[in-house]
Image (cartoon, rainbow, N blue to C red):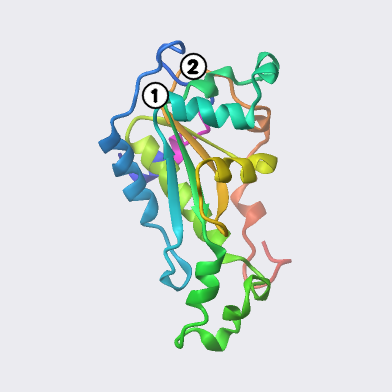
Amino acid sequence: MELSEARRRRRMVRAFGPDPDAPQPIAPATVDALLDAARRAPSAGNTQAVRFLVLDTPEAVAGYWDLTLAPERRDGFAWPGLLVAPVLVVVLVDPGAYVARYAEADKARTGLGEGPDAWAVPYWWVDGGAVVQNLLLAVVDAGLGACLFGLFAHEEAVLAAHAVPAGWRAVGTVALGHPAPDRPGRSASRARPRLDAVVRRGRWDRG
């Protein structure tokens, strides 16, 4: 698939199937190929401190949802088809690795090796976002569907339950699977701004 087509077709898929009672699994080799594509994203200082926690068994997926969406809350959940995704990928970043990298001789002059607070823009989140976008586009290219969502208040519990070492942070979780018919989220009705509304040339007041 051409990259331009993958960009055009990419969307958040919130239902997986084709049968919601028995969603089609994804071969581990396919998941590995998607993650290999995802990790080939830009990395500040070539730090390469993004990791993937892959939950790809029914037990692991169910355990994730038990931590983040209690069973008594599921009757009112707007996207039940999301809960049957056969694979969940938690994208993780290590801020400490960026601090250590920028304390090395070739980067020390930046002052960013002094600690996370020295970073006006925490590039671990930037790099994590680039990895996620790579993953979302690779999923479209593979004929699959994906949905990125945040862990929010459940981040600490999820990381602890899966023995993620201290210091790592979760960018978000990406559900993967074969897309099933669903309805768009409420945010999908928001129009995309025109190009001339988002481009400024030379000065902010020049469109």
Q: Nearer the viewer, residue 23 or 142?
A: 23
Give, as a single range, the part of the protein colored magenta.
7-13
Please tell me how crowded label 1 is: few (under 14), some (14-19), or many (20+) other residues with Cα within 10 Å.
Answer: many
The answer to whether any part of residue 5 appears in the image is: no
Instruction: Report the side of 178 relative to 199 (left or right).
Output: left
Pointer 2 residue: 181
Residue 189: x and y in percent read 66, 30
Q: Nearer the viewer, residue 176 or 140?
A: 176
Quadrant of the image containing the C terminus: bottom right
Pointer 1 residue: 178
Question: Residue visible at 46% across and 21% down?
Answer: 16
In this rendering, the answer to whether 62 lies above or below 6 is above
Quadrant of the image containing the N terminus: top left
Q: Nearer the viewer, residue 156 or 23?
A: 156
Residue 167: x and y in percent read 57, 60
Q: Nearer the viewer, residue 163 or 35?
A: 163
Mark 2 vs mark 1, foreground winner is: 1
Q: In which quarter of the view is residue 69 placed? A: top right
Instruction: Report the side of 14 relative to 202 (left or right).
Output: left
In this rendering, the answer to whether 38 lies above or below 147 is below
Three-letter amino acid code of the residue under disc 2 = Pro
Residue 30: x and y in percent read 29, 36
Distance of label 2 from label 1 (alpha carbons): 10 Å
Question: Residue visible at 44% across and 53% down?
Answer: 51
Question: Residue visible at 43% across and 48% down?
Answer: 52
Q: Is residue 55 magenta?
A: no
Instruction: Report the side of 22 relative to 112 (left or right).
Output: left
Three-letter amino acid code of the residue under disc 1 = His
Q: Secondary structure at mark 1?
A: loop
The answer to whether any part of residue 20 appears in the image is: yes
Residue found farthest to the left: 29
Q: Secondary structure at mark 2?
A: loop
